[in-house]
Image (cartoon, rainbow, N blue to C red):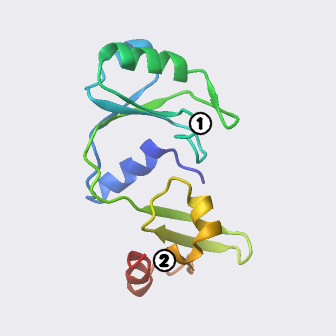
Amino acid sequence: MRLLEFQAKGMLAEYGIPIPGSRLVRSRPEAEQIKLPAVLKAQVPTGGRGKAGGIRPVTRSSEALEAVAELLGSEIRGYPVRAILAEDQTEIIHEFYLALLLDKRTNRPLAMTSAAGGVDIEEVAATTPEQIVARSFDPFLGLQPYTIRLLAKA
């Protein structure tokens, strides 16, 4: 299963994890309701959105409308942009990377974390792999507390 960012953040919020305020935008009329300043994030199931132009900070209404017009209907890494997450701008104190994926070698879920953040995670893996902590886990037992503590040390 591949989740879009807005779907994953919705799940995190359900468990009490604070996330920035946001709204999903699928049309120009919805774009006119964006609370500014905001960060507009194309909702596509792939990484590298920022470098591909799919993440745009905006401070003025005209910027937001222009960015939404450019993004909706465009493609990012082969995926059509059908929705944009308009997220309240927040001060970033600390950034980290977290991924849950399927380890194709073991056919088990794999949790990965890194204090190096998510931008260029592939480069981090290639040049400084010690900055990434990855552990597979039993899908029937789920992530155990000791594994979560290990991942949090990244």
Query: Relative to the observer, which residue lies in front, 37 or 110?
Result: 37
Q: Residues within 10 Å of mark 1 (few under 14, many from 20)?
A: few
Q: Which mark is residue 43?
A: none
Report which quarter residue 60 is drawn in.
top left
Looking at the figure, which quarter contains the N terminus? bottom right
Q: Residues within 10 Å of mark 2 (few under 14, many from 20)?
A: few
**Residue drawn where x is 27% and y is 56% of the image:** 93
Amino acid at circle 1: Ala
- Secondary structure under tag 2 reads loop
**Residue drawn where x is 38% and y is 49% of the image:** 9
Above or below residue 144? Residue 27 is: above
Q: Position of residue 125 (x, y in %)?
A: 61, 67
Q: Position of residue 145 (x, y in %)?
A: 38, 83
Report which quarter residue 40 is drawn in.
top left
For mark 1, what is the residue?
A: 52
**Residue drawn where x is 38% and y is 12% of the image:** 29
Looking at the figure, which quarter contains the C terminus? bottom left
In this rendering, position of residue 137 left or right of residue 68: right
- Secondary structure under tag 1 reads loop
Above or below residue 52? Residue 34 is: above
For mark 2, what is the residue?
A: 142
Amino acid at circle 2: Gly
Mark 2–mark 1 distance (CA, rounded to whole Å):
34 Å
In this rendering, position of residue 49 left or right of residue 148: right
